[in-house]
Amino acid sequence: LKSDSASLQGGYRDCKINVDIKGHICEIQIHVWPMWTVCGVDGYRHYRHCLEYSTDSFSDPFDALEGLDRKTIAEMVVMAEEAVADMPLDQLEWYQEKYILDYFAEVGLFMKHGLDVWAEVTLKQLIKLRCDSPDIGPNHHETFVLYKYHEQVLRKLGKTKEADQVAEKIEKFQSRRVKEEKDAEDSLWD
């Protein structure tokens, strides 16, 4: 667990302590936080909570999946499917935040596993839900995070024209935000 010891692929680190309790050898495992994702024990739930609560220090929340092998990602996709099984994507409403976050977490798994068509379909619906939300709407930062992932997926699928349209929308949003921030800063000094 020392910081100067390199972790294995996916951030794996642990410490095992064997303890003799009345003639029974018990193993105690101590894991660092990224290990919880790698080992698969509640890995999907941990990953989803990282997205929801920003508990990890990733600039891109899907970076929490870096280094995981295909089998682990596939197992997490199955867990994600189980998490949303009670609420089909096409029946989801804008106010069902728990499921929206579950589907967002699932998008990251789809993207990492090469299930780009599934990611595209899910992102389109999530963008629609965020645009329909009176609390978030089409010009909210969260909506544009979804657009950025949508653009990435479209490019991977070779849908350049659609990706360019999404990129243009993102650029307009970013330009508008910069202008609004500048105007707000200027108004402080007026």
Image (spheres, rainbow, N blue to C red):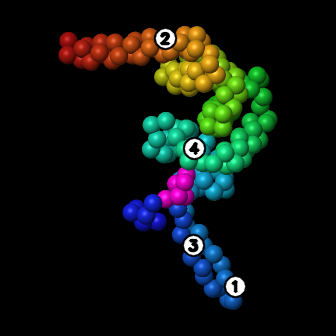
Between disc 4 and disc 2, whose residue precedes? 4
Residue 146 % position (x, y): 56, 24
Q: Are marks 3 and 4 in contact (CB under 8 Å)?
A: no
The residue that mark 2 highlights is 168
Task: Give whichever of 139, 147 is nearer the camera.
Answer: 147
Q: Residue at x 70, y 48 (%)?
A: 71
Between disc 2 and disc 3, whose residue precedes? 3
Q: Which mark is residue 16?
A: 3
Q: Residue at x 52, y 23 (%)?
A: 148
Amino acid on which disc 2 is placed? Glu
Q: Are marks 2 and 1 in contact (CB under 8 Å)?
A: no
Q: Is residue 176 left or right of residue 169?
A: left
Q: Is residue 19 above or below residue 62?
A: below
Question: How far apart are labels 3 and 4 at the CA level?
Answer: 24 Å
Mark 3 or 1, closer to the camera: 3
Q: Residues within 10 Å of mark 2 (few under 14, many from 20)?
A: few
**Which range is magenta?**
7-12
The residue that mark 4 highlights is 65
Between disc 2 and disc 1, whose residue precedes? 1
The residue that mark 1 highlights is 24
Q: Are marks 1 and 4 in contact (CB under 8 Å)?
A: no
